Image (tube, rainbow, N blue to C red):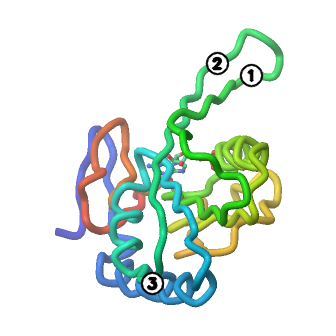
């Protein structure tokens, strides 16, 4: 099944599950080397990261902790526009090695908000591990973006955790809109 329809749009395969798995395994190996003996805390950003987080952590063999957060966006009443709020950050991150796990970095605005919140707690280190990254859409450079699965064109994608209006998160491959 190469071409699929979700709501009003058609999508074709961009990354097959096997390709995603192989890349995820390599990132896991790199994390095992980079964080050996440091017991990092992985923080997955819901909802989109749930499949990547699960598959990535199966490749992580070092001692680590796992948490999830959620970011809600809504339109503000002042001129700054969108307001974002982070939920679920209960563990203290002071002096910890933090690895934020994202599905996709698009404009990077969500990540910038999360990073600001996390840096407030004075962790020892902060790194971002994102499965997908759209360099052409990024608004401001993100110094913490250390681990990237795939750089992709500035196109809308679904599958493997990513949705289109609520559907498509369960697809095992990643599709691009056609
Ligand atoms: P950003 O703040 O970097 O622009 O993107 C934040 C969120 O927008 C991502 O975590 C993701 O949930 C959603 N997003 C960005 N690009 C895409 C895309 O191509 N497909 C889907 N399904 N979601 C996206």
The reply to whether discs 1 and 2 touch (Cβ–Cβ < 8 Å) is: yes
Residue 51 percent coordinates (x, y): 34, 61
Quadrant of the drawing holding the N terminus? bottom left
The furthest residue to the top? 77
Name the image quarter holding the C terminus.
bottom left
User: Mark 3 near mark 2, Cβ–Cβ under 8 Å?
Assistant: no
Count of picture labels: 3
> Is 35 positioned to the left or the right of 12 in the image?
right
Question: Is the residue marked 3 within 8 Å of ligand 1, measured from its CB?
Answer: no
Task: Tell me what residue is drawn at x 78 percent, y 60 percent.
Answer: 142
Residue ID for mark 3: 23
169, 5: nearer the viewer? 169
Q: Is residue 60 shown above or below 177?
A: below
Residue 47's place in the image compared with 52, above or below, is above
Disc on the earlier residue, 3 or 2: 3
Residue 70: image x %, image y %? 50, 39
**Mark 2: which secondary structure?**
strand
Quarter of the figure with residue 83? top right
Residue tagged 1: 81
What residue is shown with label 2?
75
Q: Residue at x 69, y 25 (%)?
A: 82
Kindly state the secondary structure of the residue where label 1 is placed: loop
């Amino acid at each position: 099944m190469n071409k699929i329809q979700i709501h009003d749009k058609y999508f074709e395969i961009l990354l097959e599950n096997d390709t995603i798995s192989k890349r995820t395994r390599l990132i896991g190996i790199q994390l095992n080397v980079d964080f050996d003996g440091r017991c990092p805390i992985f923080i997955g950003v819901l909802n989109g990261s749930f499949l990547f987080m699960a598959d990535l952590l199966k490749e992580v063999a070092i001692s680590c902790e796992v948490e999830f957060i959620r970011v809600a966006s809504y339109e503000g009443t002042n001129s700054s526009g969108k307001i974002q709020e982070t939920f679920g950050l209960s563990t203290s991150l002071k002096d910890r090695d933090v690895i934020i796990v994202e599905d996709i970095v698009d404009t990077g605005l969500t990540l910038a908000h999360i990073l600001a919140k996390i840096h407030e707690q004075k962790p020892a280190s902060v790194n971002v591990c994102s499965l997908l990254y759209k360099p052409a859409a990024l608004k401001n450079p993100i110094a913490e973006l250390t681990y990237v699965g795939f750089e992709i064109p500035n196109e809308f994608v679904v599958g493997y955790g990513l949705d289109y209006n609520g559907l498509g998160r369960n697809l095992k491959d990643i599709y691009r809109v056609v």
